[in-house]
Amino acid sequence: MACTASTHLNRTYTLVAANDVLLDSSVMKYSPTDCQRPELLNKKLIEGNILLCGYSFNFVVGTASMKKVSETAKALGAAGFVLCVENVSPGAKFDPVPVGLPGILITDVGNSKVLKLIFTCIFM
């Protein structure tokens, strides 16, 4: 597998979960963990780190997108993003999407060896 460096070599990054950096806990009605609205998240805690987002039903129905996750992460100064799918919903599509920031979509957390290799390629 060939890799291209997207972030700085020999640097570690903190993984910051979107639900841990909410500016206001009352915004849960906006599904902040799918990282579609940067104004709901604390930029100071995300800047320079990797933003961890969740793949919700909003992605299936089209109200959320990986492109918007990338835009949110970039607006918040993140070094990259991780989008995790906890439960694959019927109709879920995982087509490649060009984004302007290092990112990864994890569809099966059971493949930890593959994920480690992908993480190394994208974030190292």
Image: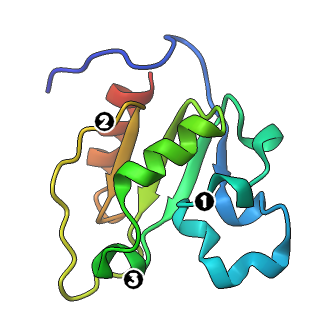
CA gap between label 2 and label 1 equals 30 Å
Bin the neighbour count of mark 2 within 10 Å (Cα to Cα): few under 14, some 14-19, many 20 and up: few
Callout 3–callout 2 Cβ contact below 8 Å: no
Outermost residue, top direction?
Answer: 9
Residue 57's mark? 3
Callout 2–callout 1 Cβ contact below 8 Å: no
Q: What amino acid type is highlighted by mark number 3?
A: Phe
Q: Answer with left or right where residue 104 lies relative to residue 78.
A: left
Bin the neighbour count of mark 3 within 10 Å (Cα to Cα): few under 14, some 14-19, many 20 and up: some
CA gap between label 1 and label 3 equals 16 Å
Picture quadrant where residue 40 is located = bottom right
Q: Nearer the viewer, residue 23 or 4?
A: 23
Quadrant of the frame with the C terminus: top left
Q: Answer with left or right where residue 23 lies relative to residue 83.
A: right
Mark 2, residue position: 117
User: Which badge, 3 or 2, is on the more N-terminal residue?
Assistant: 3
> Is 46 above or below relative to 101?
below
Mark 1, residue position: 37
> Is 32 above or below relative to 118?
below
Question: Which of labels 2 and 1 is toward the front?
Answer: 1
User: Which badge, 2 or 1, is on the more N-terminal residue?
Assistant: 1
Residue for point 78% across, 63% down: 22
CA gap between label 3 and label 2 equals 28 Å
Task: Provide residue 60's location: percent of width, then percent of height.
Answer: 29, 79
Question: Which of labels 3 and 2 is toward the front?
Answer: 3
> Is 79 above or below relative to 43?
above
Quadrant of the frame with the N terminus: top left
